[in-house]
Image (cartoon, grey):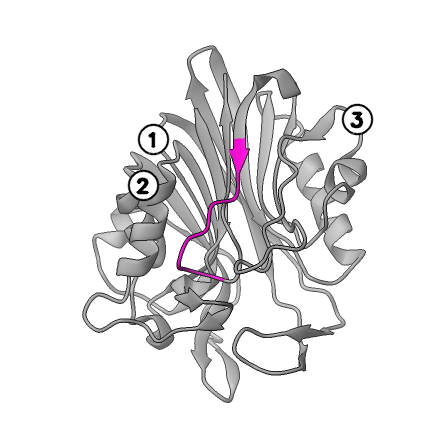
């Protein structure tokens, strides 16, 4: 069974570390091709746009789910409003909290613009859950793709999506998450997610951009949690660090058949793909 996590940078094409313009026609095509190439049975996606002008007003969660062959999926909108060049995020006061969308909402083809996280699967789903993660009160200077130097960035709300899936040997739980870039705050969010899913069926798998490097996430989670892949994922053109992780509790390393971070022409992150014997 193949599991993958991918921070898609709102489906932005990247060439040699630099943003490329969205193609004419179907603006969702580069993301759809990248997702289809992963051939994942369970797919966690971060930094997805929904009806944003910058990405052609595509419902990216719906497009990615279709490209992956998912039988079910959910998208949680962490940030409500529009991304405006030169102005940053313009919030939508009518949409202050977490909202979750699925296949029925995609059929409408319209709705308020947002930005968030998705989880898609080819497996039967017993239960869906979603949780909002509050932003850090402080920001940090960060490097932004396509811009020289550092930019002071304000942290944003985040979210986690959990699904109890039906596996060949019984139910198990998968979580898709995107954590804060603020050190310490993201560790607190990770521990909060662990506690949130504690009562759900094991084994547990946590997939996402954690903004934490290499060995830190399993150490922060403690106990039986372990990293199933140690592979650099960022920046995509020349990976130096691992921000993207597949972590597990109740699954041994012997279950891992392969792990890779393939190059795809979308995003400043590489996807992380892990094949497991479950």
What span is in magenta? 259-267
Q: Which residue has dot 2 on it?
A: 68
Of residues 65 and 147, the one drawn nearer to the viewer in this rendering:
147
For the N terminus, the quadrant is top left
Residue found at x 35% / y 76%: 21
Q: Is residue 260 magenta?
A: yes
Q: Position of residue 62 (x, y in %)?
A: 30, 51
Task: Kindly check if marks 1 and 2 are in contact, taking CB atoms under 8 A apart as contact.
Answer: yes
Instruction: Give neighbour class at mark 1: few <14, some 14-19, many 20+ (Cα, 10 Å).
Output: some
Sequence-wise, the earlier of marks 1 and 2 is 2
Q: Which residue has dot 3 on it?
A: 223
Q: Could you say which disc has been placed on residue 122 in the image?
A: 1
Residue found at x 50% / y 17%: 277
Q: Could you say which disc has been placed on residue 154 in the image?
A: none
Instruction: Give neighbour class at mark 2: few <14, some 14-19, many 20+ (Cα, 10 Å).
Output: many
Q: Is label 2 in a helix, a strand or a loop?
A: helix
Farthest left residue?
A: 25
Farthest top residue?
A: 169
Q: CA distance from mark 1 to mark 2?
A: 8 Å
Residue found at x 39% / y 31%: 41
Q: CA distance from mark 3 to mark 1?
A: 30 Å
Of residues 32 and 153, the one drawn nearer to the viewer in this rendering:
32
**Does residue 251 appear left or right of residue 58 in this picture?**
right
Instruction: Give neighbour class at mark 3: few <14, some 14-19, many 20+ (Cα, 10 Å).
Output: few
Task: Kindly check if marks 2 and 3 are in contact, taking CB atoms under 8 A apart as contact.
Answer: no
- Magenta span: chief secondary structure: loop
Q: Is residue 21 above or below residue 136?
A: below
Circle 2 or circle 3, nearest the eye? 2
Q: Position of residue 111 (x, y in %)?
A: 31, 65
């Amino acid at each position: 069974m193949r599991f993958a996590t991918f921070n898609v940078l709102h489906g932005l094409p990247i060439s040699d570390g630099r943003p490329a313009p969205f193609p004419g026609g179907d603006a969702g095509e580069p993301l759809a091709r990248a997702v289809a190439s992963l051939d994942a049975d369970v797919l966690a996606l971060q930094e997805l746009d929904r009806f944003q002008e910058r990405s052609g007003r595509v419902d990216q969660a719906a497009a990615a789910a279709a490209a992956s062959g998912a039988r079910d999926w959910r998208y949680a909108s962490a940030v409500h409003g529009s991304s405006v060049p030169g102005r940053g995020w313009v919030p939508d006061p009518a949409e202050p909290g977490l909202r979750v969308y699925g296949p029925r909402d995609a059929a409408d083809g319209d709705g308020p613009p947002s930005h968030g996280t998705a989880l898609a699967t080819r497996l039967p789903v017993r239960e869906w859950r979603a949780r909002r993660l509050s932003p850090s009160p402080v920001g940090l200077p960060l490097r932004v793709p396509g811009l020289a130097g550092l930019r002071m960035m304000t942290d944003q709300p985040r979210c986690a999506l959990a699904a109890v899936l039906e596996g060949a040997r019984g139910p198990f739980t998968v979580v898709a998450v995107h954590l804060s870039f603020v050190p310490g705050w993201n560790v607190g969010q990770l521990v909060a997610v662990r506690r949130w899913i504690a009562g759900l069926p094991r084994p547990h798998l946590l997939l996402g951009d954690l903004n934490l490097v290499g060995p830190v996430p399993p150490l922060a989670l403690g106990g039986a949690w372990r990293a199933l892949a140690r592979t650099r994922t960022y920046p995509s053109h020349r990976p130096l660090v691992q921000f993207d992780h597949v972590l597990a509790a109740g699954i041994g390393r012997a279950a891992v058949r392969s792990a890779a971070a393939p190059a795809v022409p979308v995003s400043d992150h590489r996807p992380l793909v892990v094949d497991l014997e479950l």
